[in-house]
Image (spheres, rainbow, N blue to C red):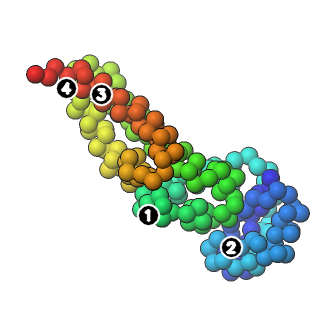
Amino acid sequence: MILYQLLCHKGHDFEAWFCDSGTYDQQVVAGDVACPFCGTSVVTKAPMAPHVATGRGKGGKNRRADILRAAGTLMAAKGYDATSMRDISASVGMLPGSVYYHFPSKEALFVELHKDVVQAMTARVREAVEGVSDPWERLRLSARAHLEGLTQNDNLVAIVSPQFIRDQTEVAKVVTDHRREYEQIFRDIFAALDLP
């Protein structure tokens, strides 16, 4: 795989992955390479050194992280079903096929995104209660950390909602497992409370 920085005749720059330089040439001649911003197929290589597939793109940035961030923003705003891989790729300046280099499907992308959000929320709550032994104080701190995570996470926590992907049964099974660890923190906190 080779990554080219491309430029359309309207001045938009973007990147795209190809099997090799011959594949790039064939696809450009056939008009199969289009600018994700304006749709034109008048595209040329921008001056650059081509990259070999390493999972890193422009300026050493991790494109996988860019894709996840864009997918999270779009899915939180529009919903899972209304967000397409084309939407995600356009928002990071990539051709749709380039996103599939990083994620084999929209479902796989969502599972990774969901896992990241749940891990961040889990770390936030664990950090808040670390070293605290009083059960009521642990409840107060964990509730605060949970609520702060809900309000300070660019709406990404909407993705953790069980209803977010209700029609995707296979994906729902995987993401339910992600949530179990997070929910177990609260079960343990509630179990330690001295309730009447």
Q: Is residue 164 visible?
A: yes
Question: Could you give the CA–CA distance between mark 1 and mark 3, rounded to whole angstroms?
Answer: 32 Å
Q: Quadrant of residue 126?
A: top left
Tell which residue pokes out farthest to the left in this image.
196
The residue to which callout 4 is attached is 136
Q: Earlier in the sequence, mark 3 or mark 2?
A: 2
Q: Quadrant of residue 78?
A: bottom left
Residue at point 46%, 45% (across, down): 172
Residue at point 62%, 53% (across, down): 105
Horizontally, residue 111 falls left or right of residue 57, namely: left
Q: Position of residue 153 (x, y in %)?
A: 39, 50
The residue to which callout 1 is attached is 78
Q: Amino acid at mark 2?
A: Cys
Q: Nearer the viewer, mark 1 or mark 2?
A: 1
Label ID, residue 187 = 3
Q: Nearer the viewer, mark 3 or mark 2?
A: 3
Q: Is residue 5 above or below residue 138?
A: below
Q: Earlier in the sequence, mark 4 or mark 3?
A: 4
Question: Could you give the CA–CA distance between mark 4 and mark 2, rounded to whole angstroms?
Answer: 56 Å
Question: Could you give the CA–CA distance between mark 1 and mark 2, rounded to whole angstroms?
Answer: 23 Å
Question: Could you give the CA–CA distance between mark 4 and mark 1, rounded to whole angstroms?
Answer: 38 Å
Q: Position of residue 14 (x, y in %)?
A: 68, 66
Question: Could you give the CA–CA distance between mark 3 and mark 2, rounded to whole angstroms?
Answer: 50 Å
